[in-house]
Structures are given as C-alpha cells and as structure tokens.
Amino acid sequence: MTCWIMGDSIIYWAAHRALQRPEGVSLGLENINVQVTWKGTRGAKLADFEQALQSALASAGHAPDFLIIHLGTNNFIYANLQSMFTMITNTLSICQQLVPGTKIIWSDILTRLFFYQARDQNSARHCLRQINRFARNRFYYQRGYIVHHPYITADNHDLFYYDCLHLSDLGSDLFINNLKAAIETFVSSPHVVEFPPR
C-alpha cells in the first residue's frame, strides 16, 4: 500500500525531520506494508492542490491507497470563512475526480503561537476551530478520514520554531508520531475514521 502526505511547509519540514529519525521517511510503516511518500511545498495553498496532485499522479503513474492532505494554514488568515469552506469542499471534489479509489484523510490545520496578519488573536483561533470543524464534517459526509493534532497547542512554546509559525523538532516529532499512529489505525481498523478518537 502507498500513502502520500501532501501539504504546505509543515509537511515539507516534517519530511526533513523524518529523514533524521531512525525509522526514516516511511516511519517504520513498511512493517505493515505501507510505503510513505512526502509531498510538501513551502507556501502551498488550497488552490495549489489540484496541480500538485495532477503532477504527483503523472510522476508516480498510479494513485495512492491513502492520501493525507495538510493544507489551509496559508489561506485562512487572508480568506473569509465562506471562502475557506468553498476551497475545502473543492479540494475534496478534486480528490473524488482524480483519485476516486483513494482513501482521503484531512489533517487538521495547526494552530500557531502568533497569527501575524490577524487583527485579533482570539478571533483567529476561533475561526481556525470553525474551519477545522467544517472540514471534519465535510469529510465525514463524504466518507473520508480525519486526523486531529490535540497535543500541538499554543500553550507549549517548545513545540514551535522561533518564528512562531513552524514546528520545532519537538513539535515535528509529535506531528509525525501522530500521523504514523493515524495511518496504522486506518490500515488496521478500516471502520475507524477519526484519529485520535474524541
């Protein structure tokens, strides 16, 4: 089985971190016959997803069994809620058109220590929760899968890089470990659609 992890700079840097870990980029998931491929692009937005997926499919020559999408971080400060909802819905539609047999997994957008472009930090966090809630509901409705990241919070500054946006090595390790556990769960228990369970 194959699992592609596509997204923005969070995925880009997580892939670099995975290279430094003993299990490597496949996270030790070869043990359950899963080959992981990281496809992160710094600065990627939801609007970039279709072209990125088309390029990945052309390069690989086949669709993955699982596709994790981690996007939206670079959108939501600049877009209103309705625009975000539309872009997320379009992203799911693109998956249904291009990789209809693939299990699609939405990875919750992570919080930040500081939202630089936001007028109000609390409002930005509230909007982020609304966006993640919408994405979860949309993916549930379309029989997708969800990965939450409950241990990455703005309360723990050690999880973030000095720019307050990206994850530190510790934060990346938590993120990677969570993705690994989610993949293991979805492979071994197909009836489970959410990780970790709430």
Image (tube, rainbow, N blue to C red):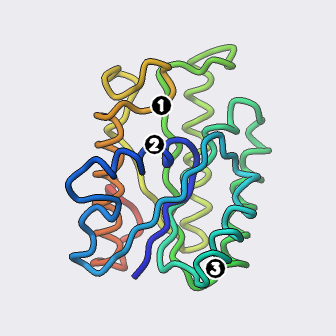
Q: Which residue is at a point 71% across and 71% down the rendered structure image?
A: 54
- Which quarter of the image is occupied by the N terminus? bottom left
Tag 2 secondary structure? helix
Tag 1 secondary structure? loop
Tell me, for residue 99, which label it has, or none: 3
Q: Amino acid at mark 1?
A: His
Picture quadrant of residue 9: top right
Q: Which residue is mark 2?
A: 13
Tell me, for residue 2, which label it has, or none: none
Using the image, determine if residue 56 lies above or below residue 73. Answer: below
Q: Amino acid at mark 3?
A: Val
Of circles 3 and 1, the one toward us is: 1
- Do the numbered discs 1 and 2 sit on residues whose CB atoms are within 8 Å? yes
- The answer to which of marks 1 and 2 sits earlier in the sequence is 2
Q: Amino acid at mark 2?
A: Trp
Mark 3 residue crowding within 10 angstroms, few (<14) / some (14–19) / many (20+)? many
| Front-lying residue, 190 or 65 | 65
Q: Which residue is at a point 68% across and 62% down the rendered structure image?
A: 52
Q: Which residue is mark 1?
A: 166
Looking at the image, residue 85 sits to the left or right of residue 142; the answer is right
